[in-house]
Image (cartoon, coloured by chain):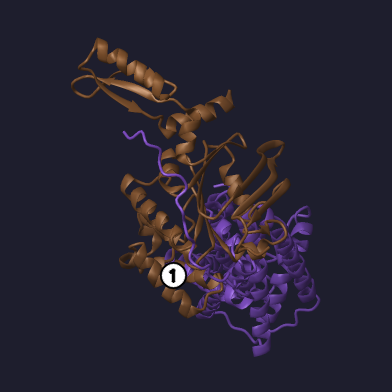
Chain colours: A brown, B purple
Amino acid sequence: MSYTDSPLIELDGLTKGFGGNEVIKGLDLTLPPGIHALLGPNGAGKTTLVNILSTLTPADSGTARVLGLDVRRDKRRIQRLISLTGQYAAVDERLTGIENLHMMGRLFGLSRRDTAARAAGLLDRFELAAAAGRRVSGYSGGMRRKLDIAVGLIARPRLLFLDEPTTGLDTRSRQTLWDEITALAGDGTSIFLTTQYLEEADVLADRIMVLNGGRVVADGTASQLKERVGGSTIRLHDGQGRVTEEIATRGTALEISRHLAALAAERPDVRVTVRRPTLDEVFLQLTGKQAS
Amino acid sequence: MTTTPRTAISTVTPAPPHPPARGAGLLVGLRVFTARSLKHSFRDGESLLMAILLPVLLMLIFTYVLGGAMDVGEGGDAAGAREAYLAFVLPAVALIAAGFGASYTSVVVSNDMTTGFMNRLRTMPFPSVTVLLGHAASSMVRNLLATAVVLLVGFAVGFRTDASVPQFLGAVGIIAVWILVITCVFAMLGMVAGSAEAATGYGFILLFLPYISSGFARVETMPAWLRPIAEHQPMTPVIDSSRALLNGRAPGSELWVGMLWCAGLMLLAVWLIAVIFPRKVART
């Protein structure tokens, strides 16, 4: 099978441990091209999985295929198709932004001319053109992250790994970065990202996998995950909009309408909203259960 | 807040895929990493200055403070002793300069290992040996520059030699080989060390090595328990043979012993790097 018509990622019974401590406990997963988020608390095994998929660490058992290629046997071929942007901006601080891009372009095997053209395009796109000639040590966290991702894109990878791309960024930089990441999907670049932020997974990903204790404990769209936990909450508000009371329901029309009918009879003026669970609540429930 | 479910999987129609990256070959990799490392060295002016200034100061102190009191066999008055000691101490100072300069490599390597930079490199399609080769090449440029300054200052403060041009180049050649060896050793230490600070610490131990050799005092003047160590450590034959050549004498068997040591250390360091590098994933 060639990489063009293969699933993006296929895991079959994948395990990995460090010194007797199993971090990945038998993962089976098939992902189509697109944006996928691996969501999980610290220590869930997110980075370990990214390291295995990006050819950095060998798995203990099971198989992992990236774009139809085996991570163990076809390492080099995978490396030509992917790019890893790790947890901390892996750029050279003592070089300028443009020097970083040039260095990586050349290492991916791009010609000087292609590298220069591609670098100029990326600098524009990530709004780094003005800072291109400055050393990275003087960049802000957000700029560094943007450069980091730009560097990862220099050779137009088929699949980009983003390990906690917005950790430590302020809200504005995060928003900018999200816009950029969303735009990437349109270029035919698939993304496999890890995050601890539920909002991030919600905004970016087509599909979210919740990883906890080395296992995928939930898998689906944000909406499906919320569905899984089920239930909607009826909230009562006072005149200032503050929540005064919450009524948990299973989310069925019948149950909600009964509650509302009762409320309408007792307190006809009370303000009410019906709320689906936030992904945070889903996450806490899913990972909490697993931990106990 | 809305109660309608978010739209399910957005349909992403991928653009026609780009061809896979070709990846760099040995030559491009070597060029990229040499350029990177040279940029580091020449932009970090303070480190470069220290790498040159410290050995020069060391040479001046040894010559002017201790030189007059040292008897390295040439005899004569204090001034004569001083001049003889300068000729004696020069190769050791040049090798110490190489050590200082190469210790910079361990700091950079350690930094790359701990920041995730090396992780990114390791997922890329180029021969990883070029990272090491680049360090070696730029370390060579940096340290030969320091060696040249040390020798020039040596000449300026009174070093005179009868060495022929081939002998002189031979001495520099030995120093160059040592630069290569010590750079590989420092690169290995940089990989093993947990942080750039730790890498510097390990480096200090290596930098003391030349003092327990024939570099600054004749081995015969040392206490009996120290003598075997000083006599048989790798730097002694390297220093002795480069000193012989620098002063226009035949190096004798010391040259081959020294080169064997260099080859052995180099192989060991490169082997360790080859073993450790694929296993060591920075835990950032």
The total of numbered circles placed on residues is 1
Relative to A114, does residue A278 appear above or below in the rendering?
above
Q: Is residue B164 visible?
A: no
Give residue A273's quadrant in the image.
Answer: top left
| Residue A163 percent across, percent down from the top left | 51, 49
As drawn, the residue found furthest toward the front would be A254
Give residue B99's quadrant in the image.
Answer: bottom right
Asked whether B235 or A33 is in front, the reply is A33
Relative to B180, does residue B113 appear above or below in the rendering?
above
| Residue A116 percent across, percent down from the top left | 43, 76
Q: Is residue A215 left or right of residue A175?
A: right
Find disc 1 in the rendering and name its residue.
A99
Amino acid, disc 1: Glu
Query: Which residue is painted at 44% across and 70% down in the image?
Result: A99
Asked whether A62 or B249 is in front, the reply is A62
Query: Which residue is painted at 36% across and 54% down in the image?
Result: A179
Relative to B12, does residue A251 appear above or below in the rendering?
above
Q: Which SS class for mark 1?
A: helix
| Residue A104 percent across, percent down from the top left | 51, 68
Location of the C terminus of chain A by quadrant is top right
| Residue B127 percent across, percent down from the top left | 65, 69
